Image: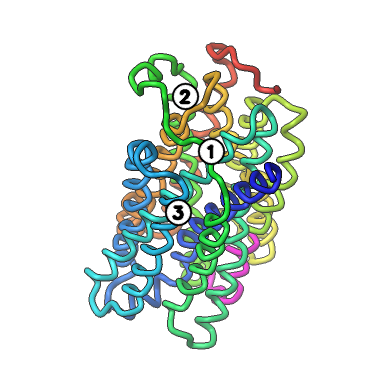
Amino acid sequence: MKNINQTGLTWISFFSYAFTGALIVVTGMIMGDIANYFNLSISQMSNIFTCLNAGILVSILLNSWLINLVSLKKQLIYGFILSIVSILGIILSNNILLFSINIFILGLVSGITMSIGTFIITKLYSGSKRGSKLLLTDSFFSMSGMIFPIIAAYLLENKVVWHWIYICIEIIYFIIFILSISLNFPESKDKIKYTKEIKKWNFNIIVLSISALLYILGQLSFISWVPQYATEIMKIKITKTGNLVSNFWMAYMIGMWCFSFIIKFFNLKHIFALLSGISTILMYVYIHSSTYSIMKYIIISLGFFSSAIYTIIITLASLQTKKPSAKLINIILFFGTVGTLLTFIVTSPIVNKKGLYATLICSNIFYGIVFFLSLLVLINRSNKISLKE
């Protein structure tokens, strides 16, 4: 029964990332249709979607406190109810304010769910196995990134109302709800005082936190505007644009599966530096590509080599202390979510003033800074925790 319970909890973690991934990834595909629905410009609509990212950010902040008051099971059950309410609100929204509120609620739900999913993995597994399982967990984010752009493109191509994509996404949370009812969850209360724990955190945790922010900001800034860049600048059809995004996330998912095996044999610091360096170069080549075929192969390579970076950041941070707590995990998720929140705040003004090309260049710069930070982590010897347990 213990193995069945552990397997069920692991699958909840997988689906928690799939749910958040689906919500974030489809934004770039359906943004134009929602903007037309509410008679807004693309840049205005992108700012509205900041509500989704803000909800995720707020929920991760709240979860450090909420996790001591409400059990993980109850949080997931309440989350299911809230997600249904918010999706019904999106369907029935007749003005942009109601839409924004419901998108914010969806962000709250997905942020708490993803935080719980990450916490479960760090509680159930340790050492290199933890890194491997976190990679598999994060691969479900990219699996959604592979599947849902295709679904969105199909729905839009066949003139189906855009809000049906959110109904499809809710199926993922329904599965989480069904699994949650019958499983026993690990203890979630942190017995260590927050201020006492912070004193044990080292320089690497600060660097890794900043890396998480810039990596997510760079990745989402890039992939969110690739559809618009491909259709408006490169004059590529919407179906092919959907394939570009889908190919990125498909390669991302396959990369995670591969690296979940590979990282067991190598030092995580070295892999972090290697992958962030390769990804920076590949993004530069993609931005300066002139044909669809080259863009396709480069974005597949980019998805593969960048796939493990965020999870390696989380794993490295969790290995900086002997007993990782929910608060430490939430700090990294918090910074990553700040990156998500800043995506359209940072890129929308750039799109308006400098254009889509300049926005992709900025994404490339963020990746370059992450590579530099990975070198700082590599040369810093402050942590004594083994990276290859």
Q: Residue at x 36, y 54 (%)?
A: 108
Give amino acid for label 2. Ile
Q: Residue 87 lies in magenta, yes or no?
A: no
Q: Work out whether mark 1 precedes mark 3 in sequence or the reverse, and give the earlier one.
A: 3
The residue under label 3 is 76
Image x and y of residue 82, in percent? 36, 62
Q: Distance between the residues labelled 3 and 2?
A: 29 Å
Image x and y of residue 28, in percent? 46, 65
The residue under label 2 is 205
On the rendered structure, is 98 left or right of 250?
left
Image x and y of residue 138, in percent? 59, 47
Q: Residues within 10 Å of mark 1 (few under 14, many from 20)?
A: some
Q: Distance between the residues labelled 1 and 2?
A: 25 Å
Which residue range is magenta in the image? 234-247
Q: How crowded is mark 3: few (under 14 residues within 10 Å), some or many (20 or more)?
A: many
Give amino acid for label 1. Pro
